[in-house]
Amino acid sequence: MTKLSVNINKIATLRNARGGNNPDVLQVALDCERFGAQGITVHPRPDERHIRRQDVFDLKPRLSTEFNIEGYPSPEFIDLVLQVAPAQVTLVPDSPDQLTSNHGWNTQAHLPFLTELTERFHGRGIRVSIFVDADETMVDYAAESGADRVELYTEPYATLYPKGREEAIAPFVRAGERAVKRGLGLNMGHDLSLENLRYMHECMPYVAECSIGHALVCDALYLGLEETIRRYRECLA
């Protein structure tokens, strides 16, 4: 079964827009678990424009599912992850002022850096996933780093899906099969939605986890959080 990890960054964005604690990020995370989410993802950024460092510390002892922290491995981020020791860390190559993730690592060029990071996180018992484009060479070098998983950046799939889903999914199938061949677990994330998720899963049933935030929170505005999570889980059944 492919697990659904709910990214709650947008909940924190809404809270931060007015100050205070409404909506309550911790309570929403617990509700997501209660409604069937199998993991919670957060992406703290240096400016704390959504998830704050304190949120990360508050969430860790209360969650009963897998906790995934993703972000660029700055010294501050590394320190946070090592302190909290989540189930998984996902390393992304974002710049500090980047609006959202829009590309994967060049794992070949950054192999020494990623290898060192993987060893440090493994020392705390943390599973390491590296965010990459659907490129078999990048998957190969991620495997060389000692990482446990790769997460394929799926925005290109989501963009091309309405024009031709077979063409859209093809490079992801190739990259996913290479990951499996290299002994890597496979995650997927970015712009996955109720429109395109089911077909992805039909073509790639071996995906371990999908991390979904923006589309899921938008759907919840109309469907409610519980019904939305049920529908996303159904796509991955």
Image (spheres, rainbow, N blue to C red):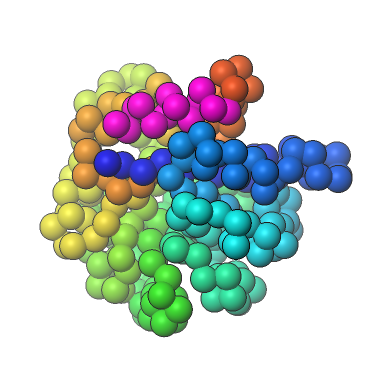
Quadrant where the C terminus is found in the figure: top left
Quadrant where the N terminus is found in the figure: top left
Q: Is the stretch drawn in magenta largely helix, strand or loop?
A: helix
Give residue 202's position: percent from left, percent from top: 22, 30
Q: Is residue 15 left or right of residue 86?
A: right
Above or below — where is 109 with respect to 177? below
| Residue extending furthest toward the right | 19
Which residue corresponds to the image point at 38% horizontal and 67% vertical from the top-left? 127
Residue 126 appears in which quarter of the rendering? bottom left
83 magenta-colored = no
227 magenta-colored = yes
| Residue extending furthest toward the left | 181
Which residue corresponds to the image point at 68% horizontal and 53% vertical from the top-left? 51
Give residue 40's position: percent from left, percent from top: 52, 49
Above or below — where is 158 with respect to 69? above
Residue 81 appears in which quarter of the rendering? bottom right
Question: Which segment is the magenta one?
Answer: 225-237
Above or below — where is 4 with respect to 59? above
Give residue 72's position: percent from left, percent from top: 54, 64
Residue 5 appears in which quarter of the rendering? top left
Q: In the rendered image, is residue 78 in sight?
A: no
Of residues 120 and 135, which is closer to you in this image?
120
Which residue corresponds to the image point at 38% horizontal and 36% vertical from the top-left? 156
Which residue corresponds to the image point at 43% horizontal and 24% vertical from the top-left? 231
Q: In the rendered image, is residue 148 in sight?
A: yes
Q: Is residue 163 left or right of residue 102?
A: left
Give residue 123's position: percent from left, percent from top: 41, 82
